[in-house]
Image: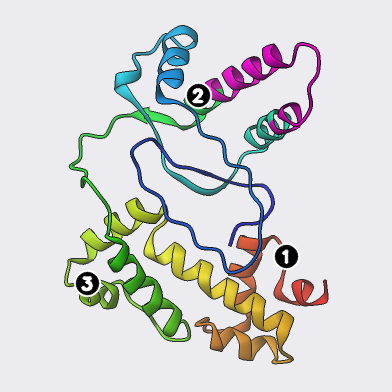
Amino acid sequence: MHSRGDVSLTPAQVPSYFRWESDDACLQIRIASQFMQTVARETIATDPDCLELRLEFQTRDPQLEAIGMMLLAELKQESVGGRLYIESLSNLLAVHLLRQYAAPKSRLIVYESGLSERQILQVVDYIDAHLNQDIKLADLAALLGISESHLSHRFKRAIGMTPHQYLLQQRIERAKQLLKHSDRSIIDIAFLCGFNSHSHLSKQFRQLTGITPKAYRAN
């Protein structure tokens, strides 16, 4: 579950998959690979063919967030010098990405694609139906008839997060629904969502949302 200020980066040629349980809003910025290559050559004197951006999920980057919001604000209004300002912000964004998130290209073998849509739905539906249980990577791999390492790599390549990250996200989302729409105790909600204690739920809930379950219910 994304919260305000979360930033996710998906490099070119990496497929992504997102699912919303309710209405939400986010800012999506797409940057042409050719533009990134030009900036790399001109500003950091680096051969872009030797670099690639890292895949990031729900990281925090106040500077990147600020640049994105300035771009959004400028695009919403027509002002003098707007085009020049947008170009300047775009260059600033590209340089920041290259400085903070670029890494030498991996020489590891990379699969050409992630999981098929049918396989993704199989895993997602299984997780949704067994959130209160101890779901192991081996269970998900067996569901598709592939190895655990292949599942982990392909799942992340397909939707931008590991099976564990997705499972945790869905457990927190289920907990949020129960906190808002039921009068169950927080310890009961913890067990219903697959957490082994009140403190376990509170720790993971705070990490993903920034507040405790009790505070979320009170809002």
Vertical side of 4 occupied by 177: above or below? below
In the image, 113 versus 79, the foreground residue is 79
Q: Earlier in the sequence, mark 1 or mark 3?
A: 3
The tag earlier along the polypeptide, 1 or 2, is: 2
Residues packed near mark 1 inside 10 Å, few (<14), some (14 to 19) or many (20 plus): some
Q: Residues within 10 Å of mark 3 (few under 14, many from 20)?
A: some
Is residue 133 inside the magenta stretch? no
Image vertical order of residue 190 relative to residue 207, above or below:
below
* Residue 200 at least partly seen: no
Q: CA distance from mark 2 to mark 3?
A: 39 Å
Question: What element does badge 1 sit on?
Answer: loop
Residue 217, by quadrant, is bottom right
The kind of residue on which mark 1 rests is Ile
Instruction: Report which residue position mark 3 lands on.
Output: 144
The part of the chain drawn in magenta is 72-95
Q: Residue at x 69, y 28 (%)?
A: 71
**The N terminus - image quarter:** bottom right
At x 73%, y 80%, the residue is 180
Q: Amino acid at mark 3?
A: Leu
Lateral position of residue 184 relative to residue 155, left or right? right
Which residue has dot 1 on it?
A: 211
Tag shown at residue 99: 2
